[in-house]
Amino acid sequence: MLGALLAQAVPFKAPTIDYHALAPEIVLAAVICGVILADLFLEESKKYLTATLAGVGVLAALIPVFTLAVSSHPARVMFGGGYVVDDFSLVLKALFLIAGYVVVLLSQQYVEDGDYWEGEYYVLLLTSILGMLMMTSSRDLISIFVALEMLSIPAYMLAAWRKRDEKSNEAGVKYFLLGVFSSALMLYGMSLLYGESGTTSLAGIGVYLHGHVSSAAALAIVFVLVGFAFKVSAVPFHSWAPDTYEGAPTPITAFLSVASKAAGFVALVTLVYVAFPGAGDIWQPFLGVMAALTMTVGNVMALRQTNIVRMLAYSSVSQGGFILMPLAVAGMGKAGTQPITAVVTYLLVYAATNLGTFAVIIAVARRTRSGEISSYGGLLSYAPGLAVLMTVFMASLAGIPPLGGWIGKFAAFKAVLSVGTGWSYALAIVAAVNSVIAFGYYGTIMREIWMKPVPDDVVGAPMKNPASLNAALGICGIATLVLGVLPGIVLRFGDLSTITGALGK
């Protein structure tokens, strides 16, 4: 009988795997194993080499991204459509790897000076980046959730890395508890979607929802969006961000504000364009209201802050509202793929600018030992280079031409106004008002730098920063200037980032 059953069984067919397409993930996984082994066998005095290995490994993972980009091969689809490597994923993979490299540069001296466990730190950081690489290619509810947890769980631990600091412990606990809660909501929504559609494939869900959105499916969509709203710190799901940003190690704060937030937006873009295009009546007003609230609340709260990291936390919330704005009109009127272009453009520019801002914060804190905005008084007199760079980054975040931030906001406004409805015009007006408000707190920092005297407790001797920190400042400063002066570069990357299978493509 057993032989007869075996004879009737369907033969197992192994999935076709494109190793070239998976090369960035494979290289990064190998680097993680290498860092673990190096940490085991290196002497304590040579643990700093784990940072070098992590940095070189992240750059090595960029090589297959470039080779995939220049190949003439169309989108590479694996695992029954659950994992796709296309132009959209390649652009975002490059963003995450470059941002990860900059964070490694920011971390090297910071971790050494703080007497933290170096090997474990870089293993967790690289594991989180690996989850982000997976997120860019995930086209299935299961792979999206696995990627999300892979990038989130290491981040929970990194937020509490300063284990002897009460604020860091508080940051880690708040981030973990709210992150777990949001994951539970999201998973419940995903289970409802699966129950309704009978598939975990985003493309399959998109086909099912086209013209057939039941009340259970609508509830599922809202739950999934709420889960990701926590991840991108959108209002009213942003309460974890200020305390987590202030308590976490500063390089990790930079990482969370850029790479982790970008991963959440990548998932939102994929869901909106592949799984939910036929349910616009559900998610478009939801995202629109959330974008307006996020911009406004983030800006108003940022105006009240005296600590620069908390101010940037609310600034990050507000910037998230600008990134949500194009998604709120996706699929409407003549928008086409402009919302995708706007989101990717904004993420690229924001990453360079915000990472540079935190690099300056780390450099200044080495001298002042303070995170207060008032400690930046007279920075021009004893660190003119940092003063100019901080001014560039603040002006870019405010969207002042010809710095990178202006092209991000321009792309967002263009995508919204292209729809030409009263709803889109109202959203654009809210964004315009918030752009003006934002200059209030960015201008406060610039005023401290250029017009206020040096605080009494700050010595005015010339500053000397580590080479790794200077490298990070140089990369971010050049990128912010080049992307603003030559906006065609970043817009080109945005135009390339069309999602395979999105809106019938």
Image (cartoon, rainbow, N blue to C red):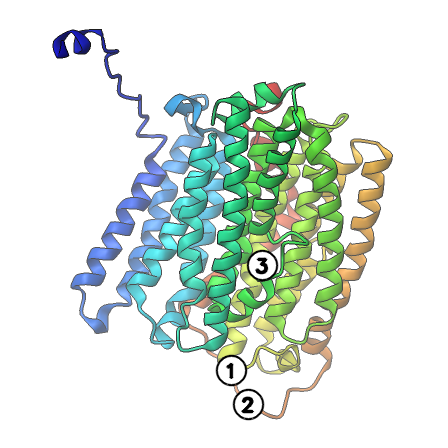
The CA distance from mark 2 to mark 3 is 27 Å
The extreme bottom residue here reads 456
The CA distance from mark 1 to mark 2 is 8 Å
Q: Residue at x 51, y 54 (%)?
A: 179
Q: Are marks 1 and 3 in contact (CB under 8 Å)?
A: no
* Vertical arrangement, residue 230 with respect to residue 361, above or below: above
The extreme right residue here reads 422
Query: What secondary structure is found at the residue carrying circle 3?
Result: helix
Q: Position of residue 141 (x, y in %)?
A: 47, 33
* Vertical arrangement, residue 164 with respect to residue 200, above or below: below
Q: Are marks 1 and 2 in contact (CB under 8 Å)?
A: yes
* Left or right, residue 448 beside residue 180: right
Q: Earlier in the sequence, mark 1 or mark 2?
A: 1
Foreground of the two, 35 or 493: 35
Does the rendering let one see residue 178? yes
Residue placed under numbered mark 2 in the picture = 459
Q: Earlier in the sequence, mark 2 or mark 3?
A: 3
Tell me the mark number nearer the camera, choosing from 2 and 3.
Answer: 3
The amino acid beneath tag 3 is Asn
Residue placed under numbered mark 3 in the picture = 354
Does the rendering let one see residue 404? no
* Vertical arrangement, residue 47 with respect to residue 289, above or below: below
Q: Earlier in the sequence, mark 1 or mark 3?
A: 3
The amino acid beneath tag 1 is Arg
* Vertical arrangement, residue 448 with respect to residue 399, above or below: below
Q: Residue at x 70, y 48 (%)?
A: 322
The amino acid beneath tag 2 is Val
Residue placed under numbered mark 1 in the picture = 367
Q: Quadrant of the N terminus?
A: top left
Q: Position of residue 488 (x, y in %)?
A: 64, 39
